[in-house]
Image (tube, coloured by chain):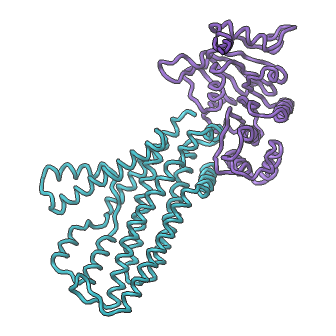
Chain colours: A cyan, B purple
Amino acid sequence: MNGTLAVARYTLLELSRRRILLVFYVVGAVGIVLLGGFLKIANTLATRGPAQSVNGATQLDPAQVNRLLEAVFVSYLLGALGIFALLIAFAIGMTTIYHDLESGTAVSLFSKPISRLAYTIGKIFAAVVALVLVVGVLGIEARLAMLLFGGGLEGALTAEVLAVVANAVVVMLIVLALSTWVNNIIAAVVAFIYYNVVATLVVTIRNLIHQGVIDNTNLRAVFDVLYWVVPHQLTSSASGDIARTEIQVSGGGSTNSATLALIPPGSGAGDILWWAFVVVVFASLAYIAVRRKQV
Amino acid sequence: MAPVVSVEALRKRYRRRDPWAVDGVTFALEPGQAFGLLGPNGSGKTSVVKMIAGLLRPDGGEISLFGSKPGDPSARARLGFSPEDPDFPKFLRAREVLDYFASLLGLDEDDRKRRIPETLAFAGLDQERREVRQFSKGMKQRLGIAQAILGRPKLLILDEPTADLDPLGRRDVRALIESLKASGVAILLNSHLLSEVELVCDTVAILAKGHVLKEGTMAEVVPEGRTLEDVFVELVEASSPKRDQLPSFISEKEQQ
């Protein structure tokens, strides 16, 4: 236990000194402030003038403009948070164990009385804590920036931040596990293709099939199986909430209702259990590789 | 007296098609004994010590480290290992590296407060504030020796400990070995510096291509009137094809 905590503590200290994480964090933090500030200024300017319209059809009062801008802000924010979480996950996953194994560090460490299991747990724990901290702080900052608007999408942001963190943890563990077997750049590329291309494609096609956009029984069976083979991203109801807000503000009709029906619902209990299973699988793969590693 | 480490018929190869890197190495080391493992590059010295430290898995033979397998963390608690070309978490400072390793060794707060500054002072790193990534090879070597002695080991393995050290550092390492030997610590020393080995080791084994060519006390291995270097060169050359002394182009005169 002491060994695990020591590994975690000093791994966190190391991660806190890596400039790349600091750069991602600073860019993310400044981006959130700039985006929020810009939209707030736009809001102030817009509500000073005459009544607004959307698509030249609906007159908007200042409160509606405020809600619309908040929806736009949250929409951009969630996209940006997802990208930054992914970058941070790759940066942590590519270095946390790989650098120890590839330099002589592992030789010094593993000659000490620490089991490889304790080492791996300490490393993964530190990596997850670092990721949650950095993305969590960005999320808190985003939540504070939302005070500029105060329009009622706070719940959507919180749920999406949790989903983003959970997804980033999976990406990080895939990269971390792969980087114990192969070069860390190859690990990052393979993880990106596997998680962000193949898995996303499988999930998207399955959603389209379930929404009736693609009508093919055989494809449905294949993608229902594939869905539970690849790690799929957890989603919150944020996309639907934002779209609903935008439609409400603009006074949407039946076309918009049809659009809303195409937005996938938030992940259920089964998806969350699958996420936990994927986390355990990739953490175990990392341990097996560390245990087998001769340094 | 029970040996702190015993190695019997040890074998290792890195790939199935490769020749054996270590083939049938056997020796034992008792408390207070300094054992020199000598050999040319690629003779298997580092493989042997890494197997003892639990870093490599043997393909054959037995290793007993304090009566246990090297994979047993409790056995490694009494082992100090200074690797050849050591490295450490590069964003940590020397003091933090030692504190990290002290935690892994299970040292309590009092021991850490006393041992870490003293060990840093011995290694000449007590005033060093930079991160390890900015260290020279020699500084890393000093830190490697520092972390190896931090836990007051009963067996200290030094793999080329003086390769990157200046003459003062070498003198310090010699003094360290003498002092540890006197206090009953067993030393396993891998080194190319034969004059150094001759000074500090009681017994030696000369390896080539994974085999022990000769083993015994210093008096048994080095006859009267000869040096360890003479014996080493003679044995190693006899075990391998003679190499050309110099590339032919070196002695060619330049055309005007």
Which residue ends up furthest to the front in the rendered image? B256
Is B16 situated left or right of B240 in this image?
Answer: left
Residue sitting at x 79%, y 53%: B113
Would residue B180 be seen by someone viewing this image from the given angle? Answer: no
Picture quadrant where residue A270 is located: bottom left
Q: Residue at the location (58% across, 43% down)?
A: A100
Q: Position of residue B27 (x, y in %)?
A: 70, 19
In the rendered view, tell whether residue B9 sits above or below residue B149.
above
In the foreground, A287 or A160: A160
Q: Quadrant of the C terminus of chain A?
A: top right
Identify the residue shown where x is 41% and y is 47%. A281
Say if B39 sits above or below A252 in the image. Answer: above
Residue A2 to residue A23: above or below: above
Q: Position of residue B44 (x, y in %)?
A: 63, 21
Residue under the point 20% across and 71% down: A259
Residue B115 in the image, given as x and y percentages of width and height: 80, 47
* Residue B206 in which image quadrant: top right
Vertical arrangement, residue A89 with respect to residue B86, above or below: below
Left or right: A171, with B132 as reference point: left
Q: Residue B129, can we see it?
A: yes
Work out whether residue A218 or residue B169 is closer to the camera in this orientation and state it: B169
